[in-house]
Image: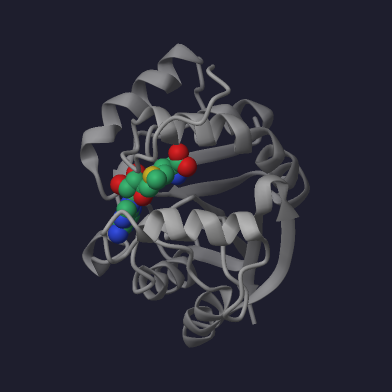
Amino acid sequence: MNQQRPPLDPHPLSEYVAWAGSRNREPLLGVLKEKLPKGPGRVLEMASGSGMHINYFAPHFEHLHFHPSDKDQSVFDNIKQLSVDHSNDNIADPVHLDLTDPQTWFNPGSPGSFSAIFCINIFQVAPISIADGMMECASYLLDDTGILLIYGPFQMEGKFTTDSNREFHDTLSSAGVSEWGLKDVADLKKAAEKHGLELKEQIDMPANNFSLIFGRK
Ligand SMILES: C[S@@+](CC[C@H](N)C(=O)[O-])C[C@H]1O[C@@H](n2cnc3c(N)ncnc32)[C@H](O)[C@@H]1O
């Protein structure tokens, strides 16, 4: 894997997204080893993209069953191929889940049927309005002790936590796409609150990213 940062490109199968994933998947695995259930359960990934994360994590949790999803169904073949290539038999076929379309929230499973949900690097290239759907959908799918882990770079209460995050925000903003840019954890907390969830833990991750862990109030 090329260690140089490729040009910014949010397409889920781009070189840039693969590069970001190759840097964050090991630290994220460390968090999941602490936070995922030790007994049997089902784990949903929202916005799976290429499927590189779910296919990296699944072999470390043979007692869990993993469910990839995305709004973009053109990535499904890639996710399935990775599962075959890695002989991951605890990963289901991907399902269509669009965080802006409540009709698709039933696709992964019935209410309360997931122990955990994770979602990696969506907010810097999606509007903050998807937070509402994400929290409502998570509240619907998680069991009583379930967790939602959101990973990415964020602002905190209107402030950038580092100069590099401000620079990244400026780079995203200069691309001319109105919804690109670092979102604020305060807005995620507000959306969570509306749907019976709250921020339980905020974990500092490498390269000025965060793992935000939400659960029921
Ligand atoms: C930058 S990619 C990140 C993909 C993957 N999580 C990763 O880190 O490699 C953003 C992903 O969010 C998905 N996405 C964007 N809007 C979405 C929505 N409303 N509902 C579900 N997925 C969405 C895109 O299709 C894309 O796969």
- Residue 135, position in %: x, y? 46, 72
Q: Does residue 163 sit above or below 187 in this rendering? A: above
Q: Quadrant of the C terminus?
A: bottom right
Q: Quadrant of residue 202?
A: bottom right
**On the rendered structure, is 58 left or right of 139?**
right
Q: Is residue 178 visible?
A: yes
**On the rendered structure, is 137 left or right of 211?**
left
Picture residue at 39% right of the left edge, 34% below the top? 7
Q: Does residue 49 sit above or below 14 in this rendering? A: below
Nearer to the camera, 39 or 78 = 78
Q: Which color mode does the image show?
A: one colour
Which residue sits furthest right?
Answer: 34
Nearer to the camera, 186 or 101 = 186
Q: Is residue 107 visible?
A: no
- Residue 35, position in %: x, y? 73, 52
Nearer to the camera, 20 or 132 = 20
Nearer to the camera, 140 or 56 = 56
Q: Does residue 105 sit above or below 156 in this rendering? A: above
- Residue 216, position in %: x, y? 62, 76
